[in-house]
Amino acid sequence: MPAIHDCADPASLLAGVRAARTAVAAGRSIVIPTDTVYGIAADAFSHEAVAGLLAAKGRDRGSPPPVLVADRAMASALAEQVPAELEPLLDAHWPGPLTVILRAQSSLSWDLGDTGGTVALRVPDHVIAIELLRETGPLAVSSANLHGQPAPTLAAQAVEMLGESVSVVLDAGPVGSGAQPGEQNGSTILDCSSPGVFRIVRQGVLPREQIADVLGDLLVDG
């Protein structure tokens, strides 16, 4: 079983973040809390680590994981360009439950799967995730569940599904809020990879109305 660290205890939190950083550097997968759900995370720049993440979930290269970053500066280093129309949304919802798909920098040495030259980026609104990201750099992160199962809001749920495929678990108690029963409890994913066109490809806890208020007619039906 993975090493589970209770983040409510300062000593355990410190040890957990150190263990998580070491595991990521070694190419292993870990479980981390975010503001929406628990995620399975791995080094975004390690092909083997990303392949291990996808295998743990029962997914293949056709389902490339998003990348979590600590801040806008880290995101800008990974994206070819951030559209000016998107800036107000990022001001309002980064950190937060908004994932944006952008054209990736062509010079990056990584392999997230069949991305078509794009990358899905998010700054999570969770202090532990941010702290870890500042130490590790960008992490490939997907919800910490087996493919087809509900995304976990408790660390124990993630451990039950993923077991020994992860080596470290940062348990921060219950996470996520804003989703109604039966609704997607992850982030809302907005495709911004085509100039002047924005499309929601997964409706999550950030309502469409809040995105439409900013983008207006630039937001097209998915």
Image (cartoon, rainbow, N blue to C red):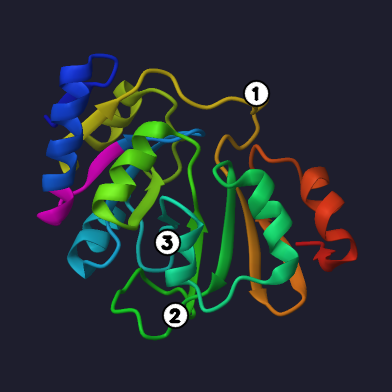
- Which span of residues is magenta-colored? 23-31
Which of pointers 1 and 2 lies earlier in the amino acid sequence? 2
Inter-mark Cα distance, 1 to 2: 38 Å
Which of the numbered marks, if any, corresponds to residue 181?
A: 1
Q: What residue do we see at 23% from left, 69% from top?
A: 47
Q: Quadrant of residue 128?
A: top left
Residue placed farthest to the front in the image? 73
> Which amino acid type is marked by label 3?
Met
Amino acid residing under circle 2: Gln
Which of the marked residues, 3 or 1, is nearer the chain's N terminus? Answer: 3
Instruction: Tell me what residue is drawn at x 36 percent, y 56 percent.
Output: 59
Q: Dividing the image into 4 quarters, which one contains the C terminus?
A: bottom right
Query: SS at mark 1?
Result: loop
Which residue was labeled with disc 3? 74
Foreground residue among 91 and 211: 91
Q: Secondary structure at mark 2?
A: loop
Instruction: Indicate the position of residue 66 as horizontal and vertical percent values.
Output: 44, 57
Pick the residue in front: 58 or 126.
126
Instruction: Please state which of the two labelled residues, at mark 3 or mark 2, is closer to the viewer.
Output: 3
Queried whether the magenta region covers residue 27, the answer comes back as yes
| CA separation in Å, label 3 and label 2 | 12 Å
State if disc 2 and disc 3 touch (CB < 8 Å).
no
The CA span between labels 3 and 1 is 34 Å
- Residue 91 in picture, x, y percent from top left: 66, 50
Amino acid carrying mark 1 in the image: Pro
| Residue under numbered circle 2 | 105
Residue in the picture at 22% in, 24% down: 13
Left or right of residue 31, residue 81 in this image: right
Q: Quadrant of the N terminus?
A: top left
